[in-house]
Image (tube, rainbow, N blue to C red):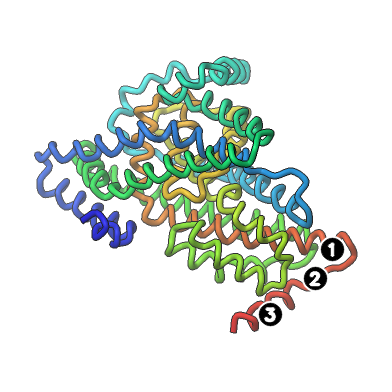
Amino acid sequence: MFKNYTRIPLIGRILVGIVIGVFVGIVFPSWTWIDILGDLFIGALKAIAPVLVFLVIMSAISGYEKGADNHFGTVVILYLGATFLSAVAAVAASYFFPIKLVLSKATTADTANAPKGIGSIVNDLLTTAVSNPVHAVMNGDYLAILFWAVLFGIALQMVSQTTRKVVGDFSDMVGKIAGWIIEFAPFGIIGLIHQALVETGTAGVLRYGQLVLLLIGTMVFVYLVVYALMVWGLVHQNPFPLVFWTLKVSGIPAFFTRSSAVNIPINLEACKDLGLNEKSYGVSIPLGGSANSGGAAITISIMTLAATHTLGMEFSFPLALILCFLTAIASTGVSGIAGGSLLLIPMACSLFGISNDIAMQVVGVGFVIGVIQDSVETAVNSASDLLFTAAAEYGDLRKAGKPVDIKKAVRQANQARG
């Protein structure tokens, strides 16, 4: 029965869950027992998220190989730089277009622990980060989880490949469990929407549309402006033929599959059509499935700052920069996991002193809008894997005195694809 259930695309099931949740919330507001579906879904996510975050980040960092040849080093710099700049753009968008969410516990949230200055920020970071890692995973202390996951990941680079593979297998296993939980998101969404309609009415739920517009608008801006400028800085040519080609070839399929991993073969074939170095893209494209997470960084930052606006918190510029840095690190490794970026929101929320309970409500909102948000995020992540892989090679060739005509390369790629 579960196999028959999962044969229906998740996006279709979520749409059905939204429709049912709205119908029940309007017609049967007294059916409060339905709210338990949302509570169970959020509770399951709260339980698995700390373990998943720890293993995914540790495994992703341990997977970086030193001394890579060809254009791989340039690609990695582009991946990490793009993820950071995406987070910066998201913070700026949240500052100019603040969004407030519908959170059932927002009015009772204790904001006294929110950091007020750079001294408080640094003190909280240092003292929280070095807490017991086991305690951190058990209690969802995401700053400590991030700190220890990075250290363990770096240390794992010095051990045997077999050990790293075991860690990677454990990461995949927990990711699979998280995937099973996410498969039941439609039921959780029914409970969450019913609860939101009963508590806030239709006006509150309509705010979800504003959040979706902000997320999509930021992602479009980042890809067409920020990423295009990065490519131009490397190749010193008009980047838009390559920008639009990667969106068409890679972004559109990724939008509908909602999986960077599924899109890897498409990107590999596109690299071949562009005539790129196989020794380079054979590594950079699979790595991009986890390390290149600009879309995820945007989602985490905007959702987190929406929570701070909802709770009436104010954030300083230094705190925003730290959020960008942590988001860029934490986003590494989540692209290949459905809804993975949403599960990192509690880590970012903890920086502002927001409790795990409220952070998980924000995650629930993320799954409600995930029908559109996750599709666009995946399209941005996957298409930019292809974009930066090509830009890195073209940029290195330009520096070596062998420039490539981008328009001609794209035209030949189109001919190769028939």
Dot 2 amino acid type: Val
Disc 1, SS: helix
Q: Residues within 10 Å of mark 2 (few under 14, many from 20)?
A: some
Q: Which residue is mark 3?
A: 411
Sequence-wise first label, 2 or 1: 1
The answer to which of 307 and 18 lies nearer the viewer is 18
Q: Which residue is mark 1?
A: 398
Q: Are marks 2 and 1 in contact (CB under 8 Å)?
A: yes
Query: For the point 26% across and 43% down, which residue is it?
Result: 188
- The label number, if any, that marks residue 203 in the structure image: none
Query: Residue under circle 2?
Result: 404
In the image: residue 152, left or right of residue 75: left
Q: How many numbered dots are placed on residues in this image?
A: 3
Q: Earlier in the sequence, mark 1 or mark 3?
A: 1
Across and down, in percent, residue 372 comes to: 40, 56
Which quarter of the image is occupied by the C terminus?
bottom right
